[in-house]
Amino acid sequence: PGGEGLACYRDASSSTRLLDADALRLCEFAPSSAPVDCYEQASRDTNLLSAQKVDLCRCASSAAPVECALEAKRETRLNQAQIVNLCRATHLERLYRDCSPIYRAPPPDPIYGGR
């Protein structure tokens, strides 16, 4: 499914004021256009810099990174850079930089108890 990144890039180019390089960074490896929705919500609801919003929303599958950032701003003394690092989609969703999931071994089989 390589078309999702292109669709995301097209959405970012048409609905945001991102430069081409930033739209590409937001959408590279994106599994859908959800990073654009996340970016747009971050634009409405936060005062993060454009590059911070891209970092926050890369690989996002929902608006969860923005919700996390808003909650962190309300409830902590973290600065914006720290909030972005804490709430970025790749961190929340346990993803590598290419948006693929970080592998975790399956739990032991409850019937056989083996690993």
Image: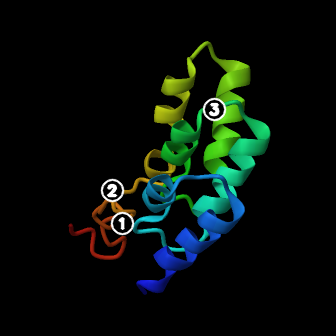
Check disc 1: other Cα within 10 Å, few if <14, some if 14-19, many if 20+: some
Disc number for residue 100: 1
CB-based contact (under 8 Å), mark 2 and mark 1: yes
Q: Going by the image, does 92 lie left or right of 102?
A: right
Between circles 3 and 1, the one closer to the viewer is: 3
Location of residue 91 (image quadrant): top left
- List the single residue furthest toward the left: 115
Between circles 3 and 2, the one closer to the viewer is: 3
Q: At 67% across and 67% down in the image, what residue appears?
A: 14
Check disc 2: other Cα within 10 Å, few if <14, some if 14-19, many if 20+: few
Give the residue type that dot 3 points to: Leu
Viewer can see residue 111: yes
Q: Going by the image, does 68 lie left or right of 88?
A: right
Give the residue type that dot 2 points to: Tyr
**Of callouts 3 and 2, the N-terminal one:** 3
Dot 2 corresponds to which residue? 96
Q: Nearer the viewer, residue 86 or 18?
A: 18
How far is disc 3 from disc 1 in space, using C-alphas? 26 Å
Residue 93, horizontal then vertical, whole percent: 48, 54
How far is disc 2 from disc 1 in space, using C-alphas? 5 Å
Q: At 27% across and 68% down in the image, what residue appears?
A: 113
Q: Nearer the viewer, residue 93 or 107?
A: 93
Dot 3 corresponds to which residue? 48
CB-based contact (under 8 Å), mark 3 and mark 2: no
Check disc 3: other Cα within 10 Å, few if <14, some if 14-19, many if 20+: some
Q: At 44% across and 55% down in the image, what residue appears?
A: 21
Residue 89, horizontal then vertical, whole percent: 51, 50
Residue 96, horizontal then vertical, whole percent: 33, 56
Q: Quadrant of the N terminus?
A: bottom left
Disc number for residue 32: none
